[in-house]
Image (cartoon, helix red, strand yellow):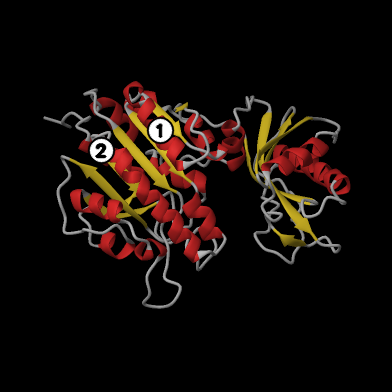
Amino acid sequence: MSQHDLVRELREDNGSKIVLLVADGIGGLPITPGGLTELETAKTPNLDAAAKDGVTGLSLPVLPGITPGSGPGHLGLFGYDPLEYRIGRGILEALGINFSVGSKDVAIRGNFCTLGSDGKITDRRAGRPTTERCIAIVNKLRTIKVPGCELFVEPVKEHRFVLVIRGEGLGDAVNDTDPQAVGVPPLAAKGADAASQKTADLVNLFVAKANEVLKADAPTNGLTLRGFASYPKIATFQDLYGLRSAAIAVYPMYKGLARLVGMDILDAGDTLQTQVDRLKASWNDYDFFFLHYKYTDSTGEDGNFAEKVKKIEALDAAIPGIRALKPTVLIVTGDHSTPSKMKSHSFHPVPTLLVSDLARPDDVAEYGERSCLRGGLGHFAAKHLMLLAMGHAGRFGKYGA
């Protein structure tokens, strides 16, 4: 029997409410040996109070030592084994902007980048352009035609866009063209099989035409492509947990992750306060709420320790408004760690806290990496977090006689 089969067998509906607050990339590292992490540096009286009232631990998004992308990181939090469900970022971005992906489509996440006169990348995110500029540049890309397929180019946010290729016999086993470095040119697309090579050939032709169209548009004069993906087969949250579920997120990709597993996507505005306001307004309509907070991740990727501390403190200020709703279970965690020191996602376990009347107390009274290391949840796989949420919400019957 699989974990999902067991969940379906034991689940019960008791009217309880679960809130999963994901502070993207919240885990960090000290800048200097023996120092404090961003989370430990931040003043977080509300998160500390929640840690004291609940139970804490460290979650492993995939496996020890493995650095996850945002897709695997979130799927694990939702209870899907990220090793079983390998879902490309392109699908998540496309679903995040509510693009209807079909059976003949390969969806791809695009990043605008800055290319020097030698064709080498000088900025992987093109200086984080405004979304308005993203839309303008996407409109230029929409003029490109490639024989043998239909192309759809859609803006997402800042430097991000979606490319969807529609045609017969396309595969999605294609490498990312982002080399994840500056000072080198974008990579050529290559397919791992004949169908995927067909996709790669179309992509390379599109990129060549795009470079010509955008050559005078620095800093957004180039692009890289990531996460080639066809639409996957995956059980919905309703089918699996029997929960009426809703996502309250600002960034499209995280809306896409939620839509992929069948959550309703609620209009959340563009600030943490508007997200909490939406949570309050929708409280009676759903059993499960996924709240996503992006800025602990983006500041970490920028290597801005002090700014990440400020974003954590802003998150802390929102906690009383959430707890005032008296959720049966409140979980605060991240999909991965993003230490400012590394300027990237990392393999480090993620500090996690769970507040519930059924939580067995531990001695932890602070929400941070060192304190969570001593917590009662211990080290656990993120794919088991929803089991803990359901159990602490009293939503499981007994297994066996």
Residue matched to label 1: 277
Which sits earlier in the primary sequence, circle 1 or circle 2? 1
Residue 332: image x %, image y %?
Answer: 33, 47
Q: Residues within 10 Å of mark 2 (few under 14, many from 20)?
A: many
The front one of 28 and 190 is 28
With respect to residue 198, does 378 lie above or below?
below
Q: Residue at position x 41%, y 58% from top?
A: 27
Q: Residue at position x 41%, y 63% from top?
A: 38
Say which of marks 1 and 2 sits in front: 1
Q: Amino acid at mark 1?
A: Asp
Residue 381: image x %, image y %?
Answer: 34, 50
Quadrant including the N terminus: top left
Q: Secondary structure at mark 2?
A: strand
The front one of 158 and 388 is 158
**Which residue, as the protein is rendered here, is positioned at the far bottom?**
33
Q: Secondary structure at mark 1?
A: helix
Q: Residues within 10 Å of mark 1 (few under 14, many from 20)?
A: some
Q: Is residue 207 left or right of residue 399?
A: right
Tell me which corner region of the image, top left, top right, bottom left or bottom right, holds residue 42. bottom left
Quadrant including the C terminus: top left
Residue 16: image x %, image y %?
Answer: 24, 28
Residue matched to label 2: 329
Residue 272: image x %, image y %?
Answer: 45, 42
Residue 391 image label: none
Q: Is residue 382 left or right of residue 259?
A: left
